[in-house]
Amino acid sequence: MSARIQRLPDHLVNQIAAGEVVERPAAALKELLENSIDAGASRVTVDLAEGGIRLIRVNDNGGGIAADDLALALDRHATSKIRSLDDLEHVGTLGFRGEGLASIAAISRLTLTSRPPGAEMAWQVLAQDGALHPPEPAAHAEGTTVEVADVYFNTPARRKFLKSPNTEYAHCEAAFERIALAHPEVEMTLRHNGKVSWRLARHTLAERVGQLLGNDFAAGALSVEAQAAGLTLSGFAGSPTLGKSSRDAQYFFVNGRFVRDKLVNHAVRQAYHDVLHHDRHPSYALFLTLDPAAVDVNVHPTKVEVRFREAQAVHQFIFHAVNKALAASKAGADSPAEGAADALDAPAASGARAPLLGSFEPPRRPASGGGSGGGSSGGGLRYDSAPRQSRLPLSVAEHGGGSGFYASLFAGVREAEQAASTPEHHTPSQPDAPPPAARLPTRHDDALPPLGFALAQLHGVYILAQNADGLVVVDMHAAHERIVYERLKTQFDAQAIVQQPLLLPVAFAADRLETAAAHDHAEALAALGLELAVLGPGQLAVRAAPALLKDADPVPLARAMLQELREHGGSQALTEHRNALLATMACHGAVRANRSLTLPEMNALLRDMEATERSGQCNHGRPTWRALSMKELDGLFMRGQ
């Protein structure tokens, strides 16, 4: 015969509940900190011993608890925060169930001391192993102190699952940081084994984020501010260049409550998709505010998961807000150089273009048979017939493209050359004077653009430029790839990818699947700026290519597009896989390594980077540029040490 059903004793019920609510010391600390915040505290001090296993003490200057309510505060489902179902559906506090203190008291030795403002004295109550001592007077300032000693002392089976004190402390510190991040207006202190780990004064959100997430995050973080349909998202999105190998630096708060939500994570990840390397994770501190009735926070024992009433709308709102913030970032935008726009002359702003030649400029020389007197039958000079390198399709001002910069940079050299070429300036009886040194432009010269002006090209891969702060190194392929990609996206969204007909169609061998794909997806290919013609069962020809990619090899481009369309289908590829298609096209059209660029072409690339969204990263999430300040360069050579 089966055992009879019976009611469990309250102490055993509390211990069972504690298994869900108080998973480890960090969970107990979280409950106590939330109570302090709900009590309106402006100062909270936390003391831990042995990672919180031996001691957790939380002291605050909040509203306190009346003497008559102390014992009730340790009872299950006793709370001052809700009174009805309507209150539960509109809950605006961090805690609301009334089971946190009761659960903690069931598995520890708990002491609760409190004094409300205006009370003559404080009162204290002790709870140990289910036994509650009567309240008694105590000495205490206005506020509350909760002391939790020997977590799981009466449940050895649970205690043995706790990790080392260092591991448990790491979890406690993480819980402390999350609460501190959400409430920068509260002064917070954390001590472990008597040593201060964190002392956080009252700060603005930006200052608190910088303290907790580090200077690197703060220096590259992008501000996020968006509001629509009762939803408000604020905070900071980390630079994609500083992607992490784990998700530890991801903080998302809903109405001040830290949550881990798959919908939120997916929305943010999608926003970073275009700029983050595939094996890295973004870092962020974002705060979503909405009507409490539009989110259910009572769906998880530890309240770290929520359920939104309009999940799809929230997902789209978060995605577009973060995506907009990331799109606003441009290479060099965070450079301290001021007045960078003034360094670009009016023709650049109006879109004027100068003819861009390749790096190979064949020298002019006399025709064969002619001497210095010009005795050839042609009577003139001719150019060598060697081929020219094709022009790089980038914008550059006709005038003022750094002319003042280069005039200053090479002034001394030119003066020396002029002096050497003028005989009357040379006196044989006097020793040769050293040529005047070239004066390098400094930050006190006319304002430079954020990425400065190009100095040279390194191994056909990197562009070296000088800006107001020091040296800028640009990966020219990655940078050009992002520029082409963003332009393709803009044209595609406007259904205006410009085609460039080829003077001579380029034929190539194709298998049956490629031939069928070219026939079946002709409209999709046209939308991408490609025109293919079927010449026969095993041959295709490229008749037109996107104008932005006119210098790309059309055959590999066509094969790549046919492969994508075969895998995903025409309409699906243009909607769900649009970015992947355009990224592949941009990769084919970007300038390749070992391509020599002229100074005007290099400067044009730098200016286009400054004007292009998301140009700090290539399509694969890798950085397109790095900067070394003069201070960092001086440190490399130990100058001033």
Image (cartoon, grey):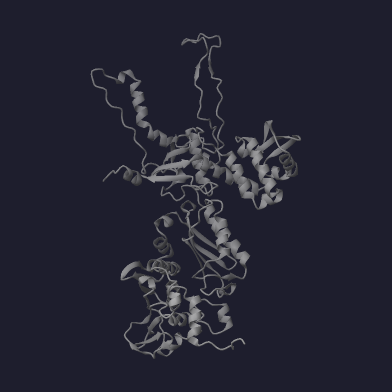
Foreground residue among 348 and 358: 358
| Res 450 seen here | no
Q: Is residue 104 left or right of residue 568?
A: left
Foreground residue among 76 and 641: 76
Foreground residue among 151 and 406: 151
Foreground residue among 410 and 315: 315
Residue 124 point in image, percent of width and height: 37, 86
**Residue at x 71%, y 50% (from the top left corner):** 571
| Res 170 seen here | yes
Q: Is residue 564 left or right of residue 211?
A: right
Q: Is residue 197 above or below residue 576?
A: below
> Which quadrant holds residue 553?
top right
Residue 78 point in image, percent of width and height: 49, 85
**Residue at x 62%, y 65% (from the top left corner):** 313
Residue furthest out toward the front: 1
Q: Is residue 143 left or right of residue 382?
A: left
Q: Is residue 271 above or below residue 47?
A: above
Residue 582 point in image, percent of width and height: 62, 46
> Which quadrant holds residue 112?
bottom left
Residue 518 point in image, percent of width and height: 72, 41
Q: Quadrant of the N terminus?
A: bottom right
Q: Is residue 104 above or below residue 525?
A: below
How many labels sit on residues? 0
